[in-house]
Each structure stands twice: as structure tokens, then as C-alpha cells.
Amino acid sequence: EAGVAQSPRYKIIEKRQSVAFWCNPISGHATLYWYQQILGQGPKLLIQFQNNGVVDDSQLPKDRFSAERLKGVDSTLKIQPAKLEDSAVYLCASSRTTVNTEAFFGQGTRLTVV
Amino acid sequence: GENVEQHPSTLSVQEGDSAVIKCTYSDSASNYFPWYKQELGKGPQLIIDIRSNVGEKKDQRIAVTLNKTAKHFSLHITETQPEDSAVYFCAASKGTDKLIFGTGTRLQVFP
């Protein structure tokens, strides 16, 4: 089966600019996650969707980050305006369900804010 | 909330030797413990997982042990090979709660 697709792979922007990331999960996976991975750290969950509803967005900086999952399939994550500390790899993952099941990760988008 | 600590942060072994990575968790209700391998420029990939009703699980050269009383779990890789070189993450969760990841261990296997 095809894996989780993400684009772009790399993005360099200036602070205060906006940026958007796209994710296409594995077909049939109801749950979609966006993680932020800062260099040298483990992934940190930003937002979790079950179909097109939000399950957990407790660690999403809502003043600048937004995410949507239209029709319960593809998802976009947006940052506006970006800060230097947003430099990280943004990983999208999907799983069949939300309960104790394998999450499949995409290759990620490396964001550099200068 | 859950907190996961992982040690060591770096580990260097000779090819053929064993490698052990240890994690501790804080929430006694956590019941799912996956291990992920992340190679350079790639997303994490699940290599093995264990649930709280099992004390040990093995898959070829990889094994995971879980001590619920002490709230720690470990990854054991035997007969290491250069292609095992990567960053390894442990994680923990309960029910539908999010996975909490450790800080990672960079494993280097020297030929």
C-alpha cells in the first residue's frame, strides 16, 4: 500500500511569513496526526483528527497554527505568522484507529524560518 | 500528563554486539509502548510494540521487555548490523490518548 505522502519536503521562509503543509494519509486510515519534531527531540503531537473531527489539539499554538482535514482524507497545516522557533520537521502520520495501533509516518517537511 | 524519559542519548557498539535502550514512563495507566526507528531524512517507522498485558515480545533480533511495576521498558537489539544505525524513539500511550515520545537514542554500529 502507498505510504503517507507529504509536501513540500523542504521550505525556507522569513519570520512573520505564512506557510502551509499538505498531507495525504494511507487510504482507509481514519486517524491523522500532525507532529512537530525539533532537532534532537522526539515528535510532539500538534493535532489529531478522527475522520474530519479534531480529537486532540491541546498542544497546537492556536494563535498561529491551524489545521483542517477536509472530507476526512487530506489535511493541511498552516502557520501564520511564522516565528524562528517554528523551525522543525513537521511530520504527518495516519493510523486505522485511535486506540493503541501503529501510526505510519510520512517523510516530513523540514521548515527553516530565518 | 505522561512523561517518557529515554537513555542513553547516544550509543555506539561494535557490529555483532548487543544494544539496549531504556525508557521510563510516569503514568501507570499507560498500556501501549511502541518503538520507532528513524533514519536520516525519513519519518519514524514502527519496529516493535508491546501492550501492558505482555511482559516481553521478540521479533528476530529485536526484543522489548516491559516492567509495569517499575514503569520501564527496554529495547534489545542483538547481533547488531551497520544498517541498525539510526535514531530510536520509545513512546507510551493509554487508550485513545496521544503517543508521548522519548527524546531519542542515536545508535551507531561500527563495522
Image: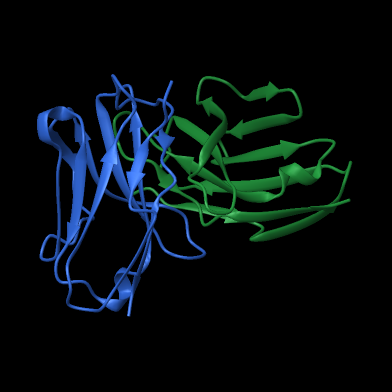
Chain colours: A blue, B green
Vertical position of residue A111 compared to residue B13: above or below: below
Residue B97 quadrant: top left
B36 w.r.t. B8: above or below: above
Q: Residue at x 56, y 36 (%)?
A: B69
Q: Residue at x 20, y 40 (%)?
A: A75
Does residue B68 appear anywhere in the picture? Answer: no
Q: Is residue A39 left or right of residue A19?
A: right
- Count of labels shown? 0
* Quadrant assignment for the C terminus of chain A: bottom left
Side of A98 relative to B43 (left or right): left
A76 and B65: which is toward the camera: A76
Residue B45 in sight from this viewpoint: yes
Residue A29 location (% of width, % of height): 29, 23
The quarter of the rendered structure image containing the N terminus of chain A is: top left
Q: Is residue B57 above or below residue A75?
A: above
Tell me which corner region of the image, top left, top right, bottom left or bottom right, holds residue B7. bottom right
- Which x, y percent locates residue A39? 48, 65
Residue at screen point 83% across, 42% down: B18
Q: Is residue A23 left or right of residue A50?
A: right
Residue B3: percent from the left, percent from the top?
Answer: 42, 52
* Relative height, residue B105 to residue A48 (above, below): below
Image coordinates of residue B22 in percent, x first then y, are: 64, 47
Between A79 and B46, the one lying in front of the other is A79
| Rendered image quadrant of residue B37 | top right
